[in-house]
Image: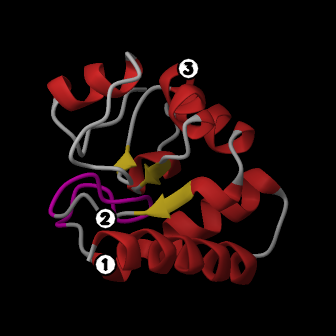
Amino acid sequence: SELDLLLDEGDVDAILMGKKTQYPDAAIRLTEQMAQEFIKMGYYIGVGGVVTFKNAKKLKETVEAIPLERILLETDCPYMTPEPHRGTRNDSSNIPFVIAKIAELKGITAEEVERVTEENAVRLFTKVS
């Protein structure tokens, strides 16, 4: 499963080639291989409702493999509503389903996922603002 990008392709290419962009810190949502490369460079990985889908095997493997300290939660509103509400309009009220799935995949509590991902968001968006 592939995830959307928060940066345009030109910025992603520049970052992969080691060039500086106007975004020193940014959230990037990618395939597992690219996610691992971006994590090495200090970027965050966005995870949304797709992680709850039965057929999201590769994304689940990515979430298991990457450190929680580099994960951000997202809604991808109005699309990609997590199970058990798939097919309805997505919004932030569905984030607990994403949190629960990440906790399950990592073998930790939902509270820990919520705490760490909140810290991640504060750390990232304090730098950007």
Q: Secondary structure at mark 2?
A: loop
Q: Which mark is residue 33?
A: 3
Residue count near mark 1 (Cα–Cα under 10 Å), binned few <14, some 14–19, many ≥20: few
Q: Quadrant of the N terminus?
A: top left
- Residue range in magenta is 78-89
- Is 81 a magenta residue? yes
Q: Position of residue 106 (x, y in %)?
A: 78, 54
Identify which residue is drawn at 27% across, 19% down.
13
Sequence-wise first label, 3 or 1: 3
Q: The residue under label 1 is which amino acid type?
A: Ser
Question: Which residue lies under the disc numbered 2?
Answer: 75
Does residue 90 appear to the left or right of 20 in the view shown?
left
Does residue 26 appear to the left or right of 5 in the view shown?
right
Give the Cα distance between marks 3 and 1: 28 Å
Please name the predominant secondary structure of the magenta segment in the image: loop
Q: Pointer 1 and pointer 2: residues touching (CB < 8 Å)? A: yes
Q: Secondary structure at mark 3?
A: helix
Q: Quadrant of the C terminus?
A: bottom left
